[in-house]
Image: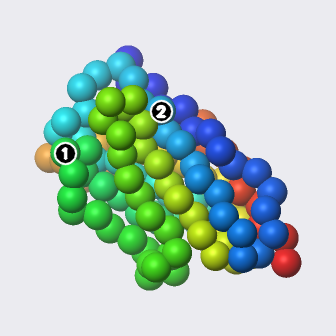
Amino acid sequence: QVQLVESGGGLVQAGGSLRLSCAASGRTFSTYRIGWFRQAPGKQRESVTAINWSGGSTYYADSVKGRFTISRDSASNTVYLQMNSLKPEDTAVYYCAAKSISTMNYDYWGQGTQVTVSS
């Protein structure tokens, strides 16, 4: 079955950087879209960024444009989220998720990785 495993979270000072990884397995993802979501305490989960596995069609939330970059490595079946110029408001649990590009909802979710940005 599909498995998504996030890693790379941690504690960083404001202005710092982190790179999250999402290792995907269990099927061929060529017709899938991979997204990163985050959920802060007491807040709803929000979409951060997404990319089609075949490349292109990237999306970024306004709050992260110019600071976060999504990319994927087909050879290792890994999607990355490079986060620069981090702010305390970026503090959240970050999840990667996968869905077929022909469906609306994300069907597969990772367990999440905590990102904490101190001021």
Quarter the N terminus occupies: top left
Viewer-nearest residue: 66 or 28: 66
The three-letter amino acid code for the residue at tag 1 is Ser
Q: Residues within 10 Å of mark 1 (few under 14, many from 20)?
A: few
Quarter the C terminus occupies: bottom right
SS for callout 1: loop
Which label number is shown at residue 54? 1
Left or right: 56, with 72 as reference point: left
- On screen, 52 above or below 78? below
Which label number is shown at residue 90? none
Left or right: 53, with 20 as reference point: left
Q: Position of residue 72 (x, y in %)?
A: 36, 46
Viewer-nearest residue: 118 or 96: 118
Q: Position of residue 54 (x, y in %)?
A: 19, 45
At horizontal 45% and vertical 78% (from top left) the residue drawn is 65
One can see residue 103 in this view: no
Which label number is shown at residue 23? 2
Q: CA distance from mark 2 to mark 1?
A: 16 Å
The three-letter amino acid code for the residue at tag 2 is Ala
- On screen, 51 above or below 78? below
Q: Position of residue 87 (x, y in %)?
A: 70, 77
Q: Residue furthest right?
A: 119
One can see residue 77 in this view: yes
Q: Quadrant of residue 78?
A: top left
Left or right: 2, with 91 as reference point: left
At horizontal 53% and vertical 59% (from top left) the residue drawn is 82
Q: Position of residue 76 (x, y in %)?
A: 39, 29
For the image, the number of numbered tags is: 2
